[in-house]
Image (cartoon, rainbow, N blue to C red):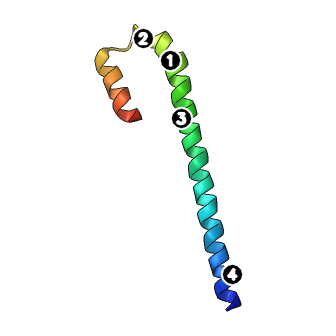
Amino acid sequence: MVRELVSVERRRWALMKRWSWMKAYQAFETHRDRIKSLGGSRKRMSKISSGGRVVMVGIDS
C-alpha cells in the first residue's frame, strides 16, 4: 500500500514537472515570437519578401 502511494506521488510529481516545463517553454516561445515581431519585422520589413512573410506566419500558427 505504501509503495503504491509513493508511485502515485512520483507520477503526480513527474506530471507537474512536465506541465510546468511545457508552460515555461510556451512562455519562452511567445516571448521570442514577440521579440521577433517587434525588433525583426521593423528592421527586415523591406528585405523580407511577401512569400517569406507568409512562410513565417505558417510556422507561428
User: Which residue is at 39% across, 10% downward?
Assistant: 47
- Element type at mark 4: helix
Measured along the vertical axis of the image, is residue 6 above or below residue 34? below
Measured along the vertical axis of the image, is residue 34 above or below residue 45? below
Label 4 CA crowd tier, 10 Å (few <14, some 14–19, many 20+)? few
Q: CA distance from mark 4 to mark 3?
A: 36 Å
Label 1 CA crowd tier, 10 Å (few <14, some 14–19, many 20+)? few
Q: Amino acid at mark 2?
A: Met
Marking on residue 30: 3
Q: Earlier in the sequence, mark 4 or mark 1?
A: 4
Residue 17 pos. (x, y %)? 64, 60
Q: CA distance from mark 1 to mark 2?
A: 8 Å
Q: Earlier in the sequence, mark 4 or mark 2?
A: 4
| Image quadrant assignment for residue 32 | top right
Residue 14 pos. (x, y %)? 62, 66
Q: Amino acid at mark 3?
A: Thr
- Element type at mark 1: helix
**As drawn, which residue projects farthest toward the bottom?**
1
Q: CA distance from mark 1 to mark 3?
A: 14 Å
User: Which residue is at 53% across, 35% downward?
Assistant: 30
Q: Amino acid at mark 4?
A: Val
Q: Residue tagged by mark 1?
A: 40
Quadrant, the C terminus: top left
Q: Residue tagged by mark 4?
A: 6
| Image quadrant assignment for residue 6 | bottom right
